[in-house]
Amino acid sequence: MGHDIRWMNVTQYLRTRADKQSKQIIFTGERLDAQAVLRLRATLLKRR
């Protein structure tokens, strides 16, 4: 117990970062919880 699952949208990170040449990903993930899933769902549904 006490373990959080964290995630980040790597595709979005790669598209918006300043250093396009680097292959390094700096993980700035957020906690994966119900609120995060709802935010992602809302974002994805807007694209339709």
Image (cartoon, rainbow, N blue to C red):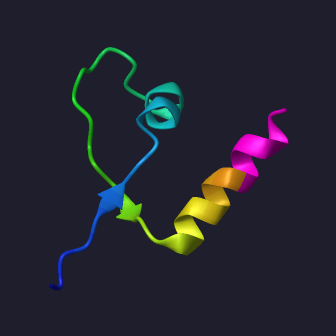
Q: In this view, does 13 lie to the left or right of 22?
A: right
Quarter of the rendering occupied by the N terminus: bottom left
Q: Which of 26 and 36 is in front in this view?
A: 36
Using the rendered view, name the quadrant where residue 34 is placed. bottom right
Q: Where is residue 43 in the image (x, y as percent from the top left)?
A: 72, 48
Range of residues picked out in magenta:
42-48
Q: Outermost residue, front direction?
A: 1
Q: Is the residue 11 above or below the residue 41 in the image? A: above
Q: Which residue is drawn at 44% across and 28% down?
A: 14
Is residue 9 left or right of 21 when viewed as pictured? right
* 8 to 10, vertically: above or below: below
- State which quarter of the image contains the C terminus: top right
Closer to the camera in the image, 25 or 42: 42
Residue 9 lies, with reference to residue 23, above or below; the image says below
Magenta span: chief secondary structure: helix
> Considering only vertical position in the picture, is 24 above or below 20?
below
Residue plotted at (37% across, 25% down): 19
Q: State the image coordinates of residue 4 (x, y, percent, origin top left).
A: 25, 73
Number of labelled discs? 0
Toward the top, the furthest residue is: 21
Residue under the point 80% across and 35% down: 47
Question: What residue sits 58% from the left and 73% below the top?
Answer: 35
Please identify the quarter of the rendering in which residue 44 is found. top right
- Membership of 45 in magenta stretch: yes
Q: List x then y, in percent, for residue 31.
A: 38, 68
In magenta segment, residue 32: no
Quarter of the view holding residue 38:
bottom right
Q: Is residue 46 left or right of residue 25?
A: right
